[in-house]
Amino acid sequence: MPEFRRIGGRIGAEIKGVDPNELPLEEVNEALLEHKALVFRGAGLDEEGQLRFARRFGELTRAHPTVPPVEGQPDILPVNGEEGIRSNVWHTDVTFVRTPPKLSTLRALVVPPYGGNTLIADSAAAYRDLPEPLREFADRLWAVHTNDYDYALPRTNTDRAIEYRRTFTSRRYRTAHPVVRVHPESGERGLFIGGFAQKIVGLSGSESRDILRILQAYVTRPENILRVVWNPGDLVLFDNRITQHYAPDDYGDLPRLLHRVTVAGDVPVGVTGETSYIVEGDDAAHYTPAQAA
């Protein structure tokens, strides 16, 4: 049986030429907890195969709280690199709701001949890198995450780009999460921030930006990042509870299409045991089943 091979010093492992659905679930989950991101080279899955693989880890979310899915596939989000609506921002998927996804899967359908990679960062390694006084400070912080900011700001003024922005913010969500999240399986602490985190609870906007910028700089240190160079048919699985990711906009007007399927997650918990809470909006029940009260 092929084994996962480490491909990054701190994050990432890959396996080649196997159907992910044929691997023992316990083995895959153990590798994911250790490496945070797994690359299945040449997995060769179709839509149903990707859905089947993701369901092995739990109930699925819908494709997105506001953005339409692939036609006829309510649980699959098309990640389409159309010019003008590329979201090249470090983020963790859908943290603006109270129960963000547990895991994300990305499957490559169309990839450009150059560029179009995906970067994945280890937020647990980032937390460990913090000097002790900064770790203790971060442990006490909470941040408000929202979808109503320029994550989806059009890069061009095309009708398509403007409509995407309108759709993305058609429902407004604001949720407070602990800045340091305790992983529910491994017990690791990780910086739970990223692009949707826009304000520190109790601080001004300018103070929040300064603090988030300092903490985010640790997440995106080169040693904490895995660069996935895509081939058609590849599948990537990453732990949305303890990573961030980013898709560099470096492939001009070339086509790029991935399909994303996410597994429903639980309510984040901070170091004191307190859980995330809604500031504005609803519980996103139309998007994701609540995995914890």
Image (cartoon, rainbow, N blue to C red):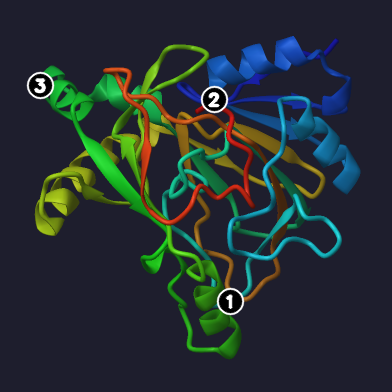
Q: Position of residue 178 (x, y in %)?
A: 31, 32
* Residue picked out by circle 1: 83
Residue 116's label in the rendered image is: none
Residue 27 visible, this angle: yes
Query: Where does the image place residue 261, in percent across and percent down from the top left?
Result: 71, 44
Q: Which residue is mark 2?
A: 36
**What's the residue type where badge 2 is placed?**
Lys
| Lateral position of residue 137 relative to residue 154, left or right | left
**In this rendering, the label closer to the viewer, 3 or 1:** 3
- Residue type at numbered disc 1: Glu
Q: CA distance from mark 2 to mark 3?
A: 26 Å
Image spot of residue 68 (x, y percent): 69, 65
Please say if 74 is above or below 186: below
What amino acid type is highlighted by mark number 3?
A: Pro
Earlier-in-chain disc, 2 versus 3: 2
Looking at the picture, tell me which residue is in the foreground, 188 or 107.
188
Which residue is located at x 19 percent, y 23 percent?
135
Give the structural element (helix, strand or loop) at label 2: loop
Can the viewer see residue 43 in this picture? no
Query: Disc 2 vs disc 3: Cβ atoms closer than 8 Å?
Result: no
Q: In which quadrant will I find the N terminus?
A: top right
- Within 10 angstroms of label 1, few (less than 14), some, or many (20 or more) residues? some
Q: Distance between the Cα atoms at labels 3 and 1?
A: 43 Å
Q: Residues within 10 Å of mark 2 (few under 14, many from 20)?
A: many
Q: Report the residue at 14% width, 17% height from top.
A: 132
Residue labelled with disc 3: 133
Tell me if 109 is positioned left or right of 227 in this view. Answer: right
Coordinates of residue 26 in the picture (x, y in percent)? 73, 10
